[in-house]
Amino acid sequence: MSTSDPGPATARVRRQPPPFRHVEVRRVEHLSPRMVRITFAGPDLEGLRVEPAASVRLLLASPGAGGLVVPHWNGNEFLLPDGRRPILRTFTPRRGDPAALELDLEVVLHGGGVASEWASSCEPGDPAAISGPGRGYTIDAGAPAYLLAGDETAIPAISQLLGALPLGTPVQVHLEVARPDGRLTLPRHPRANVEWSDLPAGARPGDALVAAVCGADLAPGTRVWAAGEAAAVQRIRRHLFDVLGLPRSQTSVRGYWKHGRAGDADRET
Ligand SMILES: Cc1cc2nc3c(=O)[nH]c(=O)nc-3n(C[C@H](O)[C@H](O)[C@H](O)COP(=O)(O)OP(=O)(O)OC[C@H]3O[C@@H](n4cnc5c(N)ncnc54)[C@H](O)[C@@H]3O)c2cc1C
């Protein structure tokens, strides 16, 4: 063992995520040129409960693996039998149907990733596996107001939150889309004010979202839920904590993906 090898005594051990449930694609629906809804189905979905803004990990077949191979947990990460990292990406479990044993994921077709490319061409019968769900967001029904903010990857979670927030609570919603045709019809909430921003050509992902959140008027006690590109949500955090002085207990801000970096990651803060 080299001197720089921390050895087994100090190796990081993480709690094993929930086991994989085998599923197959049952339906595919294009919601916009930028978003596809994939309905997965299978008996393994028995008992899977969907909360707003939760997460699941989607396992896809790796090239050359001869089909879908379920990886093993080595105490820190999932690995395939040949030592490679599996194709594993995190999505929002958008709708579960316990009777039909179905689960919908809504995937952004951003064009540059394995999951996005798979989603753009998957067909009924294609195999996959799902691990989860991870924890969802607990709504504070007594909060005086909510601000929900995100990019396209947060549309599924924000749609769920809009459907779950008390009907009398005022809600500001700020969404950034990479292209105008990425806008979708959101569930109706009587007190919601929804503002869409287009990302200007050449701008960094999240620039329009950060500007919208920084320009928002927040009544005292407003709860903030935000998710999107990691560096952009870091700028949102700085605004909320350093400029507005919001207590962290009033906010949930998550990086959902990182510009220029592929892969699954635990990006909660
Ligand atoms: C809790 C949680 C919930 C999520 N929910 C959803 C969801 O419901 N729907 C959804 O589509 N995504 C969701 N995401 C984000 C999704 O996991 C990432 O976008 C993921 O990287 C997509 O995998 P990929 O294989 O398509 O791209 P990767 O192979 O991971 O990345 C390839 C390249 O594409 C870039 N990239 C990744 N995502 C985007 C994007 N959206 N726009 C532009 N460039 C991108 C990367 O920076 C990288 O350069 C969620 C993430 C988390 C943590």
Image (cartoon, rainbow, N blue to C red):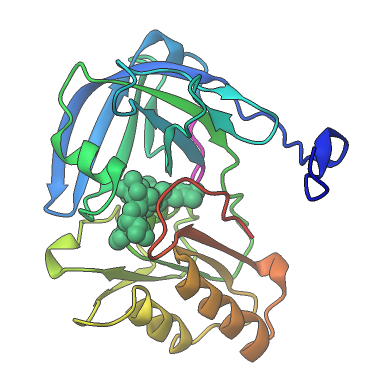
Residue at the front extreme, as displayed: 2
| Viewer-side residue, 5 vs 110 | 5
Asked which quadrant contains residue 88, the reply is: top left
Q: Up-down: is 40 above or below 120?
A: above
Residue at horizontal 37 percent and vertical 34 percent from the top = 95
Q: How many marks?
A: 0
Residue at the top extreme, as displayed: 43
Q: Up-down: is 18 above or below 249?
A: above
Within the magenta stretch, is there residue 46? no
Residue at horizontal 46 percent and vertical 70 percent from the top = 170
Q: Is residue 159 visible?
A: no
Residue at horizontal 30 percent and vertical 52 percent from the top = 187
Quadrant housing the N terminus: top right
Quadrant housing the C terminus: bottom right
| Viewer-side residue, 105 vs 51 | 105
Residue 49 location, x and y as percent? 51, 27
| Viewer-side residue, 188 vs 244 | 244
From the image, give the main secondary structure of the stretch colored magenta: loop
Residue 217 location, x and y as percent? 49, 87
| Viewer-side residue, 136 vs 220 | 136
Q: Is residue 41 visible?
A: yes
Q: Up-down: is 206 above or below 91?
A: below
Magenta stretch in the rendered image: 49-54
Q: Is residue 67 left or right of residue 221?
A: left
Q: Is residue 36 left or right of residue 162?
A: left
Asked which quadrant contains residue 75, the reply is: top right
Residue at horizontal 62 percent and vertical 25 percent from the top = 73
